Amino acid sequence: MVNTFSNIGVFLLATIGILYLFAVLMRFLLQLARADFYNPISQGIVKVTNAPLLPLRKVVPGMFGVDMASLVLAVLVGWLMILGCGLLAGVGLINPLSALLWSLIGCTMTVLAIVFVGMLVSIVFSWIAPQSGHPALMLLRQLLEPFCAPVRRLIPPLGMIDISPIFVFILLTVADKLLFGFAQMANMPQFVYQLFWHIPGF
């Protein structure tokens, strides 16, 4: 019975943690892409993340146009998620420095997963609803542009077919494999690895 409550606790904390981590990382990515701040989805993400982010910005300034406070907040959310789930799972108190490193790796894996899935969604809707003006799709295109544009400059479209997403998928997959290797080198436990999102199939 104790194990049942422990599993439920881990499930709830991991679910809430990864959803909030998603919101924080989305805010970082949308700011990085200079996406539409007034998009209703952008506004929703801002409202959800403002409470911890605004005071954090007073001590963590931005650098080179990058919102460093969002990155720090994301790593802190992952760190707390790891420590909390470790306690609930009966692992005990995990070394805070190890948890910080694992959180950094996990947050990076989650960013890759967000971009990977976002690319899939964008490609599907480019076929079934190419002219859609839905706020979610418009925001998704803006979010993905910083990842696709550099590849598109190197690999121009073949006629009407843009093949740059294929190479973006390859690069994302290679990066995910490298991160998996780093996770193993950092002795990241399997249960910690599973707390974060990663590219499907890894």
Image: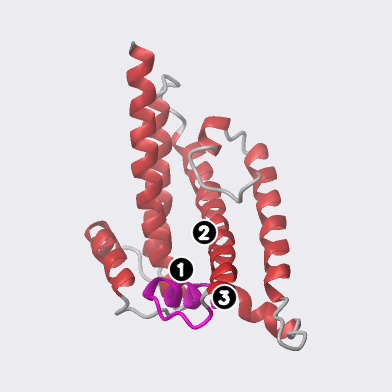
Q: Amino acid at mark 3?
A: Ser
Q: Are marks 2 and 1 in contact (CB under 8 Å)?
A: yes
| Image location of residue 24, percent across then percent down | 37, 59
Q: CA distance from mark 1 to mark 3?
A: 21 Å
| Residue 68 appearing in the image | no
On screen, residue 91 above or below 56: above
Question: To which quarter of the image does residue 40 belong?
Answer: bottom left
Please give the range of residues in magenta. Answer: 130-145
- Mark 1 sits on what residue? 29
Residue at the front extreme of this rendering: 128
* 107 relative to 17 in the view: left or right: right
* 172 relative to 44 in the view: left or right: right
Under tag 3, what secondary structure?
helix
On screen, residue 109 above or below 1: below
Q: Nearer the viewer, mark 1 or mark 3?
A: 3
Residue at the bottom extreme of this rendering: 159
> Which of the marked residues, 1 or 3, is nearer the chain's N terminus?
1
Residue 133 lies in the magenta-colored region:
yes
| Image location of residue 66, percent across then percent down | 45, 73
Q: Nearer the viewer, residue 39 or 65?
A: 39
* 9 relative to 47 in the view: left or right: right
> Which of the marked residues, 3 or 2, is nearer the chain's N terminus?
2
| Image location of residue 121, percent across then percent down | 54, 65
Query: What mark, if any, has residue 126 been given in the picture?
Result: 3
